[in-house]
Image (cartoon, rainbow, N blue to C red):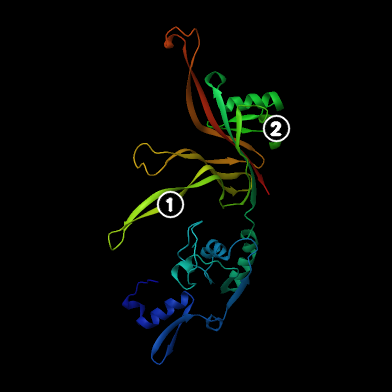
Amino acid sequence: MVSFRYQKSDGQVRQFVIAFLKSLGYSVESRSGVDFIVKSKIADLAVDDVVKVYRPRFRDASYLSRVLGPLFKGRFTISRAVVAPVNSGVTQNVPPSSAAGQIDQEFDILLFSGVAKEVLVLEKLLPQVDMSKGEIAVKAVIYEVSHTKSEGSAFQALLNVLNSKIGVSNNTNVQDLGSSIKLSIGGFDALLTAVSTDQRFKLLSQPRLRVRSGEIAKIVVGQDVPILGAVTYQQGGNAVQSVQYQSAGTILSISPTVHDDVIDMKVSQQLSNFVATTTGVNSSPTLIRRSLDTAITAASGDVIVLGGLTETKTTNTRSGVSFLPWNLGKQDDDSTVDVLVILQLEKV
């Protein structure tokens, strides 16, 4: 679909439409009194036009045409006004000529038609734009840390262990970022070895991921649980209950973007499990979830510790002789369980 504005001062309507379509790369052919709109052939181009054929090395041709298109008066064969959002590609086969197919289509060849001067400028720009996006190797460890109020936070428990084992101190190796800390240590494996000696740290997951810049890597350690969905009624009045599956367990999603000096990364961490429902819809389980969503910036090799997923449990204990009233020897012990996500990002 195209739209344009026409005024009588622009001349005859037919000639105006033909010139308008030609600017978009189309020509009009008349057959038996009927006008057909077709893609322009090379012979229809201006005499001084030059066609440049380029095979992208790293980036998609659609990306190159979107970035470079506004700089030139010439035409890229795949320039489109509508661009599919990131990670919203069509998940099933669609006709290539359909609107969805055109928007989501990828090309392995870039064609440009313009004057020779523009082609020379384009040849200089393409190597600077068609560059590798880069990849990131992500090492991640997820711990569940049990501690009491007297022992401080899970961050402090981690720093105490690292200080006693590999000499990490608050003054020299640690940058406090509020709900996270950045560590400068010799190696990621040394951190894991030091923490593994403390029984308060329970290892939940230890994924290793490699992901391209701008893409999403996701790891799920758990199970898909069926839950009740919508109810539909057939023509005869019979109710049909749909069933949906929802993931539960340890779910880690990472989306990094590589820059020259730093790495921007979106992190989503979830710990969840299902329990029997006692209120609401009893036929469906209840999802108990602790989640963390954040965006961080780090240099290659930095170790980031994320926290904030806290659960407090109170344990009632009693000491003293048995014949005394219960409340005389009663003691409440509050223990806290924190989840720490430790990440190390390295450019590949």
Q: Nearer the viewer, residue 329 or 250?
A: 329
Residue 164 percent coordinates (x, y): 69, 23
**In-front residue for pair 343/51:** 343
Q: Which amino acid lies under the numbered mark 1 shown in the image of this protein? A: Gln
Q: Quadrant of residue 153?
A: top right
Residue highlighted by disc 2: 193
Name the residue that disc number 1 marks: 244
The Cα atoms of the two marked residues, 2 and 1, are separated by 41 Å
Does residue 223 appear in this view? yes
Q: Count the marks: how many?
A: 2
Q: Is residue 239 left or right of residue 87?
A: left
Whether pointer 2 and pointer 1 mark residues with C-beta atoms closer than 8 Å, the reply is: no
* Image coords of residue 154 (percent x, y): 57, 27
The secondary structure type at the circle numbered 2 is helix
The answer to whether 328 appears left or right of 42 in the picture is: left
Residue at 60% x, 25% y is 157
Disc 2 residue type (three-letter): Thr
